[in-house]
Image: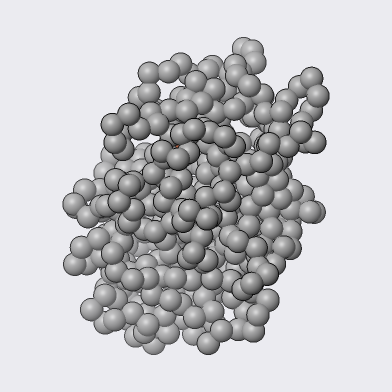
């Protein structure tokens, strides 16, 4: 079996980024050692439809305590594809995010903004036969962080995907169109300028539910089994 | 290359992943796909614990990293899709955050994998954390497999002086220690897979 397509370095961030301070002590400095395809691991965990519960993809319900979560209800949907445009079917998508006030449930989040007793902010879903996933959630708020004076993260949703094998793993963040914080955000700006748009969802009136929720499309492209002959 | 789609860029895991990805381990009210217990009670093989810390370039242990392991069974076979149809089967996959342990350790309770395809027994590792914009791949080999390690074609790609960073030390029978160093003279070897 041939291996996975390689990482496209021209769209990916670097390991040490001067704007994002925490990378300075955490990004390795030695060059990565390339494992040829014939020696690489081609399998990977296969969490499929049997691994999601009924409300896992509905973040407006899966954290309820005594009522509905506050904030703007939204639909986040899209397709997961490989680089050749083939759908990535029956594969796990995990998400987590802040609530409408910009506060995470996480115990170490110290931001002075209210928790919502009816919103946890995490969920998962599995792609369908066309690679499509769909979450119902609350639009996350912006929140401050300590990277530099008056630093704020743009609204975002964290994504974690496995794809078709060990090499296709992706951890990323989805942003919203028109957010004025994007151009100020060192994490978003760690991506080469031409590729930054790939992380911004598209507002999609077609995918909205009238009288209920607006919708955003966020398509995701993962490394996939390589269609070209095996590299040396 | 020309008509390929562009990959979605990677972004950092951030510090607040726990209630999404490792909820049970951190005591949040949500389940998680996998934790540090990779071997089931009935999984055949030699029981081992592999634990360690992750150090940043200043030598401080990292408290907001997540380590994932993908491994073969004791016979050297990786679990296939059918194994994942059964929630209680051996899946060869583990996930552990470092923030739930007072010493910021990751801990995996598993079985020692068999060799596979002429390669020495090893755990495939995905490492991600706040402050890392792209996750990293490394491997954990076992110190008491010296002959197999000597013949391993992936270790052979690594300069001799750095190979030790990929080998878990046997602390006592059944317990291996594997520390990861993000930077410095003994920076762990990371792979482009
Ligand atoms: Fe975040």
Q: Nearer the viewer, residue A215 or A133?
A: A215
For the question of whether residue A96 can be seen, the reply is no
Q: Nearer the viewer, residue A77 or B21?
A: A77
Q: Nearer the viewer, residue B31 or A122?
A: A122
Residue in view at x 66 percent, y 24 percent: A73
Residue in view at x 39 percent, y 87 percent: B151
Question: Which colour scheme appears in the figure?
Answer: one colour
Compared to residue A133, the image places residue B182 above or below, namely below
Q: How many labels sit on residues?
A: 0
Compared to residue B111, the image places residue B120 above or below, namely below
Residue in view at x 50 percent, y 20 percent: A101
Q: Nearer the viewer, residue A123 or A28?
A: A28
Q: Return the x and y of residue B145 as percentages of the image width and height.
A: 35, 78
Compared to residue A175, the image places residue B165 above or below, namely below
Left/right placement of residue A219 relative to residue B39 reads: right
For the question of whether residue A29 can be seen, the reply is yes
Q: Return the x and y of residue A89 as percentages of the image width and height.
A: 73, 56
Q: Return the x and y of residue A146 as percentages of the image width and height.
A: 31, 33
Q: Return the x and y of residue A145 as percentages of the image width and height.
A: 35, 32
Q: Quadrant of the N terminus of chain A?
A: bottom right
Residue in view at x 68 percent, y 53 percent: A80
């Amino acid at each position: 079996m041939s291996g996975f397509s390689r990482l496209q370095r021209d769209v990916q961030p670097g390991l040490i980024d001067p704007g994002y301070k925490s990378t300075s002590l955490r990004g390795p400095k030695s060059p990565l050692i390339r494992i040829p395809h014939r020696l690489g691991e081609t399998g990977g965990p296969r969490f499929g439809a049997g691994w999601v519960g009924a409300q896992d993809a509905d973040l407006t319900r899966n954290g309820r305590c005594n009522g509905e979560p506050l904030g703007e209800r939204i639909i986040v949907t899209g397709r997961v594809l490989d680089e050749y445009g083939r759908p990535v079917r029956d594969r796990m998508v995990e998400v987590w995010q802040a609530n409408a006030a910009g506060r995470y449930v996480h115990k170490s989040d110290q931001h002075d903004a209210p928790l919502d007793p009816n919103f946890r902010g995490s969920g998962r879903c599995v792609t369908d036969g066309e690679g499509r996933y769909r979450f119902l959630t609350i639009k996350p708020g912006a929140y401050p962080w300590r990277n530099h004076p008056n630093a704020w993260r743009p609204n975002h949703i964290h994504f974690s995907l496995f794809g078709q094998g060990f090499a296709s793993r992706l951890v990323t963040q989805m942003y919203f169109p028109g957010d004025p914080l994007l151009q100020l955000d060192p994490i978003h700006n760690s991506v080469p300028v031409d590729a930054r748009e790939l992380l911004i969802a598209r507002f999609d009136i077609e995918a909205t539910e009238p009288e209920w929720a607006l919708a955003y499309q966020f398509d995701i492209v993962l490394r996939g089994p390589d269609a070209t002959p095996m590299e040396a | 290359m020309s008509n390929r789609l562009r990959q979605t860029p990677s972004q950092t895991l951030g510090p607040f992943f726990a209630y999404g990805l490792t909820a049970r381990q951190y005591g949040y009210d949500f389940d998680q796909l996998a934790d540090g217990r990779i071997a089931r009670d009935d999984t055949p093989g030699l029981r081992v614990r592999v634990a360690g810390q992750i150090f940043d370039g200043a030598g401080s242990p990292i408290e907001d990293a997540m380590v994932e392991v993908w491994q073969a069974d004791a016979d050297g076979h990786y679990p296939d899709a059918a194994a994942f149809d059964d929630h209680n089967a051996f899946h060869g996959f583990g996930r552990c955050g470092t923030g739930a342990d007072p010493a910021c350790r990751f801990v995996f309770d598993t079985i020692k994998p068999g060799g596979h395809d002429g390669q020495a027994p090893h755990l495939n590792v995905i490492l991600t954390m706040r402050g890392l914009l792209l996750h990293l791949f490394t491997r954990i080999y076992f110190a008491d497999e010296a002959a197999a390690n000597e013949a391993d074609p992936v270790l052979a790609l690594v300069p001799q002086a750095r190979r030790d960073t990929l080998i878990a030390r046997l602390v006592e029978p059944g317990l291996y220690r594997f520390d990861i160093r993000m930077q410095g003279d003994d920076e762990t070897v990371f792979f482009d897979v």
